Amino acid sequence: MTPLPRRPRLSFFVSHRGSNMRAIVSACQTGALAADPVLLISNNRTSAALNWAAENGLPHAHLSPKSSGSEDALDQAHLDALQEAGADLIILAGYMRKIGPRVLNAFSNRILNIHPALLPKYGGQGMYGHHVHEAVVSNKESESGVTVHLVDDEYDTGPIIAQAKVPVFREDTPDDVSARVLVQEHRFFSETLIRIVSGEIDLDALG
Ligand code: GRF
């Protein structure tokens, strides 16, 4: 893989809300993160993320298996859009689908995902959103957290880049844990990207 440029171009894949994407875009705007958001792709035509991108001038595309005709055509459409945007990094932030083999191959060690738990615990198919935090509370964990990891062809199994913990208190509901983790996510994803862009974290040494 070619080295990351000093100021990488970021593309986002988001299915729903997009609060992590917005936090990262904001870090770029303040100058804290030396990177340029260039594209948002969503599989969900009515997602808040897509709406936000449209209102805020971030180039965006709605691409789904239905709109492309097949999974393979969708994979190619993703690749075309990413190459046209000149994307250097792909940021999955609440993207509820797997990434196809063409994009995985073209962006080897350049696709990051954020997961709202301390992987390898509470990951894998079906472990998303409130399911994660419900499992954490019902197992009486004393801590949970955030994992940023490289993406492979399975859910939540790629090499871990960085993790941050949050406490879980005895009286917490899953919603309490979710809210605490989300605050940490918004801070931690940008912080991790800053360490990647500065060269402190070498993605090619992980994958
Ligand atoms: C986050 O909790 C993230 O960890 C998970 O999906 C959620 C997305 O939230 N993968 P948002 O769309 O960024 O608000």
Image (tube, rainbow, N blue to C red):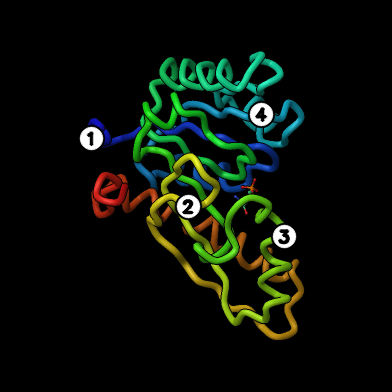
Q: Where is 191 relative to 153, above or below?
A: below
Write the residue at 59% across / 54% down.
Answer: 124
Give the x, y percent position of residue 45.
73, 26
Between disc 1 and disc 3, the foreground one is 3
State which quarter of the image contains the N terminus.
top left
Q: Secondary structure at mark 2?
A: loop
Left or right of 168 on screen, residue 118: left
Q: Amino acid at mark 1?
A: Pro
Amino acid marked by disc 2: Thr
Pointer 4: residues within 10 angstroms few (<14), some, or many (20+)?
A: many
Nearest the viewer among 23 and 69 is 69
**Label 3 element class:** helix
Measuring from the top left, give residue 123's x and y in whole percent.
Answer: 58, 58
Q: Earlier in the sequence, mark 3 or mark 4?
A: 4
Q: Label 3 sits on what residue type?
A: His
- Image height check: is 22 above or below 148? above
Q: What type is the residue that disc 4 sits on?
A: Asn
Residue 47 at what x, y percent from top left?
Answer: 72, 34
Is the residue 25 above or below the residue 102 in the image?
below
Marks 3 and 2 sit apart, C-alpha to C-alpha, by 18 Å
Instruction: Name the mark nearer the viewer: 2 or 1.
Output: 2
The residue tagged 1 is 3
Do labels 3 and 2 touch, CB within 8 Å?
no
At 60% across and 63% down in the image, what residue appears?
A: 122
- Mark 2 vs mark 4, foreground winner is 2
The residue located at (30%, 45%) in the rendering is: 197
User: Mark 4 = which residue?
Assistant: 43
Question: Counting residues from the N terminus, which is met first, the one under dot 1 or under dot 4?
Answer: 1
